[in-house]
Image (cartoon, rainbow, N blue to C red):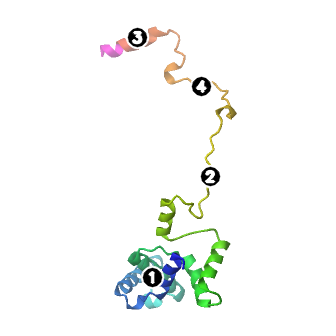
Amino acid sequence: MDPQEKVYEAFYHYDFNSDEGYKQGLQQVYEQYIDMHNQQNPTEQITVDGIDKSAKSILSLQAKVFFFCQKTGDILSLDDYEVWKSKYESHSRPVTDTVTETAAEAPPYSSNYEHLVNLIMNNQPVPGIKQIPNVVLDPSTGSKHVLKERKKPWEVAEPTGGEEAVNETTSTEEAV
């Protein structure tokens, strides 16, 4: 079984209803949502019971993912999990077959942090990262510049009078 599948299965079977830390966190999420909603819509004040079901389920799922990832240290992508969950619950085929097919359909993506670290540490290619070849261009193939270089302010042609005008200003500054 793929390590990411183990994370999905652990998340699927985790008992959030008996976890007091999750319940308190979810309550805070609901309160923040209510505060934000009530500030944006002062004429339409709501309570926890007034949050519509779709928003409540999204908030709950996001809180579950946040709490689970924080507690276990695993990384969980909601999109990948939803795909896995629909195939896991359908039981039409074994889960391992469906996950590999999903990986073939979509660009390769691994949301498991430890897996990514192992790939990088073992000098293996990371899925979803484009490999750019190291190309050194031959200097002779480059274009040549044709414009004259701009003169620096102190290289600009001096006014008529040359050094005398410069010496006069210098001597008056020294006198002061």
Q: Is residue 122 rendered magenta in the image?
A: no
**Left or right: 174 with respect to 73?**
left
User: Which kind of residue does numbered mark 4 sit on?
Assistant: Glu
Question: Which-is-in-front pick, marks 3 and 2?
Answer: 2
Question: Reading the chain from its start, which is encountered first: label 1 or label 4?
Answer: 1
Q: Which mark, by number, is residue 64? A: 1
Q: Give how far apart the Cα atoms at labels 3 and 2 are.
A: 62 Å
Q: Nearer the viewer, residue 92 or 71?
A: 92
Q: Residues within 10 Å of mark 4 (few under 14, many from 20)?
A: few
Mark 4 = which residue?
149
User: Which kind of residue does numbered mark 3 sit on?
Assistant: Glu
Q: Give how far apart the Cα atoms at labels 1 and 2 are.
A: 38 Å
Q: Give how far apart the Cα atoms at labels 2 and 4 are.
A: 35 Å
Callout 3 touching callout 2 (CB < 8 Å): no
| SS under mark 3 | helix
Work out which quarter of the rendered image holds the C terminus and state it. top left
Q: Residues within 10 Å of mark 2 (few under 14, many from 20)?
A: few
* Residue drawn at (37%, 88%) of the image: 19
